[in-house]
Amino acid sequence: MNFPTFNLILTVFLFWLTIQIGASHEEYLSYFFILTVGIIHGSNDISLIKVLTRNTGSLKKYLLLYVGVILATIVAFVSFPSLALFFFIIVSCYHFGEQHFHNQVQSQNTFSRLLFFGYGVLIFGLLFYFNSENTSIIINELIGYTLNENYFLWFMIAGAILTLVFSIYNIKNFKSSFNYFQELFLILLFAILFKMAALLWAFAIYFIVWHSIPSLVDQIGALYGKSNKLNVIQYIKSSFVYWLISIAGLYILYYTTTYFEIQFVTIFFAFLAAITIPHVVVMYFLNKN
């Protein structure tokens, strides 16, 4: 079974599960999957940096950049939350689209990167629009502003237009295996899923099934040559310390929510931003190479 088929079957199963379980169970499952598969997929960046700098001798430079990005993200969310949130969403849009399409284009150029970004905008637009109430609450707690549903609607429409336009521009750049009907079906499936699932659960399903798992396959291939059971175990072992540090940091942040009187999910998304943005930088250079 190839990975698109596996991902599709898993998505359909989780869609069925969404109908069967209550909101509290969705929340528990969301945190479980994000804190395990989701965090692990970004916990081996140091090893990936070593691969990227293997022939250049610039490991220290990349490590300093990596740590600097983490610290800058934390400072930005404290000092300039609106700007930091905007930047995080833009970077995440590109990152999600890049993971979805980078293996489906023959070469990466300006038009393919605009497709990556546009597709990510569409995915986040669907997620935000169909969960506009909860999205507005989280945004308000992060930056102090309330956005109404129309903002998310136009964000979604912008993503749809960008995806359509740059899909056309990339017609000759897509690999022969690219399937337009499959992509359209997936977008419709995501729209229905995001409409029926709560915000965190909808995000978790896409983040794990369509981003983290494919990214893990790519990373294991880059580190060990191919994806198999032994290399998966090796990847988890090498990621464990960094994963444990991330969980410990989140555990500390969990107790800060009682002092600031905000939802844990708000702190959770801020935490994801701090560890996601440096990971995006690493994956950009990995996919570029």
Image: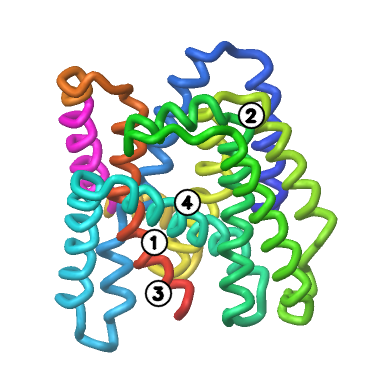
Callout 3: helix, strand or loop? helix
Question: Residue 282: image x %, image y %?
Answer: 35, 67
Which residue is rendered at x = 46% and y = 70% of the image?
225
Reading the image, the residue beneath label 2 is 14
Give the structural element (helix, strand or loop) at label 4: helix
Q: Earlier in the sequence, mark 2 or mark 4?
A: 2
The residue labelled by disc 3 is 285
What amino acid is found at the position of numbered circle 4 in the picture?
Answer: Lys
In this rendering, the answer to whether 168 lies above or below 244 is below
Q: Nearer the viewer, residue 17 or 78?
A: 78
Q: Predominant secondary structure in magenta?
A: helix
Residue 187 is left or right of residue 207, and the answer is right
Proximity of marks 3 and 2: CB atoms separated by less than 8 Å: no
Asked if the stretch drawn in magenta spans residue 208, the answer is: no
**Residue 215, percent from left and from top:** 49, 57
Residue at the bottom extreme of this rendering? 56
Distance of label 4 from label 3 (alpha carbons): 26 Å
Q: Are marks 3 and 1 in contact (CB under 8 Å)?
A: no
Specify the segment rendered in magenta: 239-254
**Which residue is situated farthest in the right direction here?**
181
**Closer to the camera in the image, 59 or 156:** 156
Real-space CA distance between mark 3 and mark 2, rounded to the nearest whole angstrom? 32 Å
In space, the residues marked 4 and 1 are separated at their CA atoms by: 26 Å
Q: Which residue is mark 4?
A: 229
Q: Check residue 241 for magenta coloring.
A: yes
* Image x and y of residue 175, in percent: 74, 75
Q: Given contact means CB atoms under 8 Å apart, are the residues at marks 2 and 1 in contact? A: no
Figure quadrant of the C terminus:
bottom left
Q: Earlier in the sequence, mark 4 or mark 1?
A: 4
